[in-house]
Image (cartoon, grey):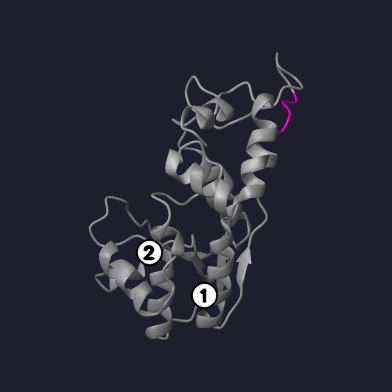
Amino acid sequence: MSELVLAWSTGKDSTASGILAKLHNIKIDKIVTAMPDPFKEELILKEKFEDFMGMEVSIVEGPKFEDFFFRQKKRGKWVGQIYGWPFTISPTCARIMKWEPMAKAVNQDTVFILGIAKGEARKVFSPNRSLLLEYGLTEEDARNLCIEYGLLNPLYERYRRTGCVRCPKQGIDAIRKMKIYEPEKFKWCEEHDKESFVTFKPGISFTDYCVKHGI
């Protein structure tokens, strides 16, 4: 028999999906998430979400940000060199660091509940489900539902994007806030910046980027 698993990203759509399951007595067998570089607020939200759902959220084992991008190359011309900062044009991070670990952590016949809302271009492929689509909720509806139950990710009020704390796709305002709210990760970026052959932003290192913007 298939397991029904909520793929929880900590975002509004997947959180609202969990709320809908709870409200409509849809039995979820497991909640899984991958957190390669979590914000502190996400770990607090995880505890609140677990209390609401009445079940544990399993953090699946997968590559962590620093271990994946700053690992040494094992073969080829540049053996021993660090891979370094991810390219900002690369779309593969979420697949490698989140979706693949979650897929490996469940059974082959698992049915995922995905946070895809009404009006999105993304598709839900069978046998997976989207409760947001089934109950006709848009992204704004999902946000409002999270607010109603006190489960909206607080990062929405602080950052323009979530994802990984140290992602080069984060804007300058997010980096300023990283220094304030995640000082140990900001320090890590400073300490490891010179190890990377790839610059943090195109053509500029993390250190120089911060100096340029007065951080």
Q: Position of residue 90 (x, y in %)?
A: 47, 32
Within 10 Å of the Cα at label 1, are there few (<14), some (14-19), or many (20+) other Cα atoms?
A: many
Secondary structure type for disc 2: helix
Q: How many marks?
A: 2
Which residue is the extreme one toward the top?
A: 77
Residue at 50% x, 36% y is 168
Image quadrant assignment for residue 18 = bottom left
Q: Which mark is residue 49?
A: 1
Q: Which mark is residue 84?
A: none
Q: Tell me the amino acid under the disc marked 1.
A: Phe
Query: Does residue 109 appear left or right of residue 72 in this picture?
Result: left
Q: Is residue 63 visible?
A: no
Residue at 46% x, 52% y is 162
Query: Does residue 201 appear left or right of residue 83 in this picture?
Result: left
Q: Start and end of the magenta stretch?
A: 69-74
Q: Tell me the amino acid under the disc marked 2.
A: Asp
38 magenta-colored: no
Q: Where 163 sits versus 155, above or below?
A: above
Q: Is residue 46 visible?
A: yes
